[in-house]
Amino acid sequence: MRKVLPARIKREEKLEILGSPILIKETKQERRQRENAEQKWALIQEAKRLQKQGYSLRRIAKTISCSWVTVRRYLAIQEPPSAHRGKRPKPLDAHQEHVISMIESGESIKTIYTVLTTQYGYQGTYGAVRVFGTEFRKKKKQGQPFHAQAYYSRRTIRRLLWQNPLAEKEKRNAINDILQQYPVLGPFYAFLTSFRACVTDRDAEGFRSLILFEKNREDPLTKAFINRLLTDFQPTLHALMNEDSNGYVEGQVNRLKMIKRLLYGRASFHLLRIRMLYRSQ
């Protein structure tokens, strides 16, 4: 997903005043970012054209003057890159709704910070909470709308696609929003939900059909995972058909290694044998 999604994905919002959309003039920085994205997409198209002609990765890299690793990444891209640079998510992003509700109930910034750190596991700074609270109170006083967390973080989207919480309206809307912005994730999301359903239900035949279908589809997002899975495909199917596992043996091996490290340089094999047999009897 790092190949497709930026670190922060802006939410799709349509703002209107008196029925007419807001026209925002493109800044110099935005124009430069758009031109860079167009140049990158042209380079990607050139790399794909050379690949169809039978050029190797190194020959393509030499032709377009870049690394062969970059060429391999370019060939996996299916749609034009975004012109907007993603920003790093902040620790406060996941707690903005809590901060807003506490501010509206009359709590002070110091109290809000204490509640966030003790009850919600907030690991950010006090200054971030103070700046956010000041901005929210200022816009509320001026009667301006305040959009809390007007973007999704890549970590949040990754968790939503895996957990698939369709019963919750807000999270379901977030998944739909992302799939509309990035259609290339549609087949990947379908494969992910089917994969998890087969493993949860221990459906070996459904799992076999799903993996073989995905292999024939050759999706760049799942191709490496499918190829690696097929190297141990039969043992994976056995794990779905049988409930037996080697978990007990692996636990004993882990215990043996831990005791061996504790006794290293201080005891002999005789004591190590006694320590191992003591718990197993």
Image (cartoon, rainbow, N blue to C red):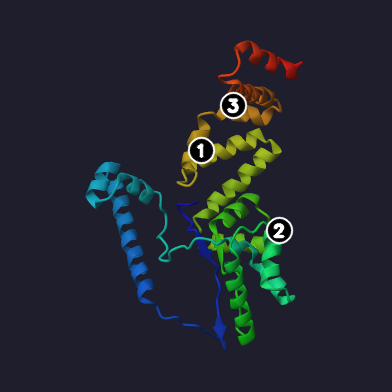
Alpha carbon distance from label 3 to label 1: 15 Å
| Residue 219 vs residue 166, the one in the foreground | 166
* Figure quadrant of residue 239: top right
Q: Amino acid at mark 3?
A: Pro
Give the image location of residue 161, x and y in percent: 60, 53
- For disc 2, the marked residue is 118
Determine if residue 105 is in view: yes
Q: Residue at x 71, y 63 (%)?
A: 115
Residue 249 vertical position relative to residue 114 in the rendered view, above or below = above
Give the image location of residue 116, x and y in percent: 68, 62
Q: Residue at x 52, y 42 (%)?
A: 214
| Residue 1 vs residue 206, the one in the foreground | 1
Q: Residue at x 55, y 30 (%)?
A: 233
Q: In this view, which residue lies farthest toward the right?
A: 281
- For disc 3, the marked residue is 235
| Residue 172 vs residue 7, the one in the foreground | 7
Q: Sequence-wise, which precedes: disc 3 or disc 1?
A: 1
Q: Amino acid at mark 1?
A: Ile
Give the image location of residue 33, x and y in percent: 36, 67
Q: Residues within 10 Å of mark 2 (few under 14, many from 20)?
A: few
* Figure quadrant of residue 143: bottom right
Q: Residues within 10 Å of mark 1 (few under 14, many from 20)?
A: some
Q: Sequence-wise, which precedes: disc 2 or disc 3?
A: 2
Residue 175 vertical position relative to residue 253 in the rendered view, above or below = below
